[in-house]
Each structure stands twice: as structure tokens, then as C-alpha cells.
Image: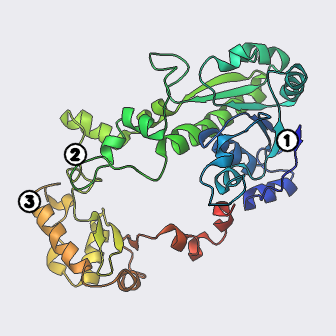
Amino acid sequence: MTESLDLPESPEARESSVVADAPLAGVTVLDLTRLLPGPLAGLRLAELGAHVVKIEDTGAGDYAREMMLNDGEAPPSAFWRLLNRGKSVERLDLKRDSDRATFLDWVVRADVLLEGFRPGVMARLGFDYETLARLRPSLVMASITGYGQHGPMAQAAGHDINYIGYAGVLDQLGDSNDAPIVPNFQIGDLYGGGQAAVQAVLAALVAAQRTGRGRWLDVSMTHEVFRANLIPAVALHRQGHAPRAGADLLNGGVPCYQVYRTRDGRYMAVGALELKFWQTLCDVLGRSEWKARHWSLGQAIGGDDARALQAELAAVFASASQADWTLRFADADCCVTPVLRLEEAVTHALFAQAREALTP
């Protein structure tokens, strides 16, 4: 059963629908996934011009339809609509013979299949990769899971917070007391799942075009995030342990790379890592005596002088509002910028062409 829905498209998806030479024009993707990681991968492929068919069961469908609804709001939710714009939706019961046949008809015409079930579910349905590849040898199938298809945790349940916890990433997202915070940005789902799957799919499509043979991609969100945990890994190799909050170059251990509170309770992001940027910052603040107090000139990272200078900088930034500081640094080339709230970011001129990406 094909569901008729008016799904708003992103600017990229709308452009792809009319531009025949969009990067993935002519590519058909079957998206069996739910919630966030897989649907994001399908969305990104749709934005590149692929024809993405979202296949949901005939019952509740994707759980995202009912998530984060306002009181009295009818589904599907903004969560579901944001992730599935630009796709067509097919409702199939994959345990019913007629719908199974319909699904296999789609497979014969498909280039990519995205699925996010626990390991073994596709095989129990009779849709393991070997079976599907006999029908479509060039098929690329990406299986997105928390912990991979094999190994001691393959069947374990999990969510983003669990994946980044195992990967040593949540430990690095520490507050001033060195306690992990709960981030409102799903690193495991978005990077380890969605974006990593897109990267793997695109590479596999190139190989399939060259050889005529597809492949089965095992995308483990936890493993992908673990592989990307590079900066703490540098410290691990250098000193035998990962740095604690405020003890290293990029996690608050230097005054030139820090977030400072302003008089009105807002924040400025200071990213003056390079000496030239730091010295320009000092000029803007009228503190030329600070120019030599920089990590590249020997200031100990996380040391006493670094902490003392952070306190001095904090006092300076607390003397004016975020708007005042934004104006003062607007024309200074030193990587000092406001920390915007999302409702401010969506109206900023920087995102004029991308604004609809966050409009369901």
C-alpha cells in the first residue's frame, strides 16, 4: 500500500528532482529503517538525487511518527517529517505473501537497501543479503546497528547515549566537575549511524558500478564513533591516558579555546588557537600584555598560568553583553563568535539557503 503524503522537500531534494545530472539521479534506495540514524541516511541520499522509498509496516509504522508531538497534534510528528521529506512511502507487511512479493519487486529495481533491525532479523524474514543479491547482484545493503552484526554485544539493545558511552566519547563531554553531560546532539546516531552509512553506501555504489557486484555493509554506530574519537586517542598514545575536562588543548585547558559567559548570561566561543588569532584578540580587548601568554609560546596547557588567564578573560567577557562582544569582534579575524540558540541560528544570514532543512 502506497501512502499518499504531502512531504515537504529540502532545497537540495527539490533541486535534485528537476536536475537530471544530480549526483545520485537514477539511483533507487529502499529505506526500511526507523527513528533517526537510518532515516537520516536515506534523507541525505534523497538530497543527492536518489529516489528513496521508505518502507514501513502496515501497523504503527516508524515509531518517529508518534514521538515529540505537541499536545493535541496529529501524527506524523515534525521529527518524522524532517527526516523523511523527499521520500515516497510504501506500507508493507513483510510477513504477508503478497507484500513480500511487492518488496522483492522493489529489490529487483533497487540499488541500495538500508535496514536497521537487530542482527538476524532480515535473515529470519528470508531477506538476508545472499538471497537478495541473487535477485539483484549489484545491490548494496547497509545494515545499521548499535554494536555490529557480530561480536559479544551484537544482540544488545542501545541508544545514542549507550553507544557514545562505550566508545569513550561520552566521558569526554564533561562539565566543570568532570561529570559526563547528556548531549542534545546525537553523535552516535547522526555520525556513527547516518553519516557513516552514507559514506559507506557511496563507496560501495562506486564499486558496484565498476564491477557489477554489490556488497553488504556492516555499520556499527559504536565502532564508527570509537574510530572517530581521535583527539583523545592522541593523548592516550602520548601520555597513556585520555585527558580530563580542562586538561588538554581542545577541552578547556587553554584560555584561547574556551567558552566565556557574558554579562547577560549568554556565551561567546573563543577559538583563537593560533598565535596570530590570539594576538588579534588581545588587540581587540586592549590587553597587549597577554600576547605572550599562549600555549604555542610555552604556556603550560591546563597549568596555573592558563587557569589564571582564563579567569581574567572570564571577568572581561562578563563585563558586556553577547551582542556587544559580537559587534566588537565582527570585523576581527580571530575566531571569536557568539554561541547562538537554535531559534537564532535559523534566522541568521549564514543559513539563508539552508533554513528549510530544519522546517518540517
Label 2: which residue? 244
Mark 2 or mark 1: name the one nearer the start of the chain.
Answer: 1
Residue 289 appears in the figure? yes
| Amino acid type of the residue tagged 2 in the rendering | Arg
Q: Which mark is residue 325?
A: none
State whether residue 282 is above or below residue 302: below
Count the numbered circles shown.
3
User: Which residue sits furthest left?
Assistant: 304
Label 3: which residue? 304
Label 1: which residue? 26
How crowded pointer 3 is (Cα within 10 Å; few <14, some 14-19, many 20+) is rated as few
Foreground residue among 35 and 19: 35
| Amino acid type of the residue tagged 3 in the rendering | Asp
Which corner quadrant holds the N terminus? top right
| Amino acid type of the residue tagged 1 in the rendering | Gly
- Point 44% across, 16% down: residue: 152
Mark 2 to mark 1: distance in Å? 49 Å
Residue 117, quarter of picture = top right
In the displayed structure, does residue 228 sit left or right of residue 321? right
Residue 48 appears in the figure? no
Nearer to us of marks 3 and 2 is: 2
Q: How is the image coloured?
A: rainbow
- Point 14% across, 78% down: residue: 289
